[in-house]
Image (cartoon, rainbow, N blue to C red):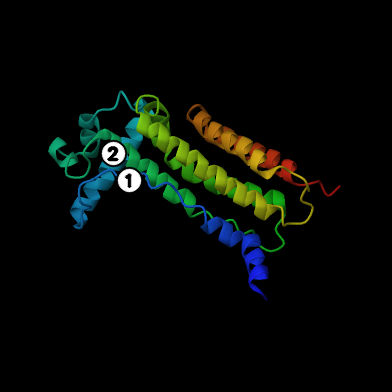
């Protein structure tokens, strides 16, 4: 195989396309306090994150204070500052955890799996991770309106998820009965916005409604990419 053929093979390799998309590193320039090493300190940090996640879900970003988070975690306020310099850093940490969780979702369908089942499974996995961080996403939507640097981070997040959706759709187009001539980047942009919109609505939905919405969204995605078998 010559170099040109190798290059084409690499470009067609879905695994390589997926590796080329790197997620935003939200904490890269945050100057967080040194990460704890002792189990007791690690436990306090996790309790602070869990308390913030719950409070953000219940009250939103502006109405949640550092005192609230510390009290919810049963940690002195001074102990909060051993782990985070601000409420903003807690939110960034939670959103970074969300992106890390999403990045673990693989795009490789099982051999012989029906495309509809593949799409439904992938979306179910993604929303299970999203819903765990629902409080963080509610607070994030609120915070990006008041902090310009978070607006830039938000744009980077959506650019990353859009690229992952493109990579997924490109992989799915290799399966039988895929529609030809689909504008994958444009479709991915539309569906990515739909996926985030569903997450925004989840606060007002019960678990059964969320499952129904996820399945309906999976079906829309399937019909956009595949023809029915008849």
Left/right placement of residue 150 relative to residue 206 reads left
User: Label 1 neighbourhood size at 10 Å, few (<14), some (14-19), many (20+)?
Assistant: few
Q: Quadrant of residue 63?
A: top left
Q: Is residue 152 above or below residue 26?
A: above
| SS for dot 2 | helix
Q: Which is in the foreground here, disc 1 or disc 2? A: 1
Residue 29 point in image, percent of width and height:
29, 45
Residue located beneath label 1 in the image: 27
Residue at the image point whose x is 51% and y is 41% from the top: 159
Please report contact status of discs 1 and 2: CB closer than 8 Å, yes or no.
yes
Residue at the image point whose x is 15% and y is 35% from the top: 77
Q: Is residue 114 above or below residue 61?
A: below
> What is the quadrant of the N terminus in the image?
bottom right
Q: Quadrant of residue 11?
A: bottom right
Residue at the image point whose x is 21% and y is 34% from the top: 71
- Given residues 29 and 133, the one toward you in this image is 29
Q: Is residue 21 above or below residue 111?
A: above
- Given residues 219 and 155, the one toward you in this image is 155
Determine if residue 15 is in view.
yes
User: Label 2 neighbourhood size at 10 Å, few (<14), some (14-19), many (20+)?
Assistant: some
Dot 1 or dot 2, earlier in sequence: 1
Determine if residue 121 is in view.
no
Residue located beneath label 2 in the image: 89
**Distance between mark 1 and mark 2 Cα atoms:** 8 Å
Query: For the image shown, how many numbered marks are present on the structure?
Result: 2
- Given residues 114 and 144, the one toward you in this image is 144
Residue 211 point in image, percent of width and height:
59, 38
| SS for dot 1 | loop
Residue 228 point in image, percent of width and height:
81, 46
């Amino acid at each position: 195989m010559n170099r040109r053929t190798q290059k084409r093979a690499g470009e067609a390799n879905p695994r390589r396309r997926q590796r080329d998309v790197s997620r935003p590193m939200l904490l890269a320039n945050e100057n967080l306090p040194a990460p704890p090493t002792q189990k007791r300190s690690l436990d306090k940090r996790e309790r602070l994150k869990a308390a913030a996640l719950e409070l953000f879900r219940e009250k939103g970003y502006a109405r949640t204070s550092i005192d609230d988070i510390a009290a919810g975690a049963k940690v002195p306020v001074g102990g909060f500052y051993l782990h985070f310099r601000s409420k903003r850093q807690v939110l960034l940490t939670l959103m970074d955890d969300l992106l890390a969780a999403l990045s673990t979702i693989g795009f490789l369908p099982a051999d012989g799996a029906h495309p509809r089942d593949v799409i439904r499974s992938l979306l179910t996995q993604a929303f299970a991770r999203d819903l765990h961080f629902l409080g963080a996403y509610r607070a994030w939507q609120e915070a990006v309106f008041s902090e310009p640097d978070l607006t830039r981070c938000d744009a980077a997040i959506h650019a990353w998820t859009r690229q992952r959706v493109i990579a997924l759709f490109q992989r799915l187009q290799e399966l039988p009965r895929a529609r030809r001539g689909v504008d994958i980047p444009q479709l991915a942009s539309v569906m990515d916005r739909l996926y985030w919109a569903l997450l925004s609505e989840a606060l007002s939905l019960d678990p059964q409604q969320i499952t129904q919405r996820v399945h309906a969204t999976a079906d829309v995605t399937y019909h956009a990419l595949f023809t029915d078998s008849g």
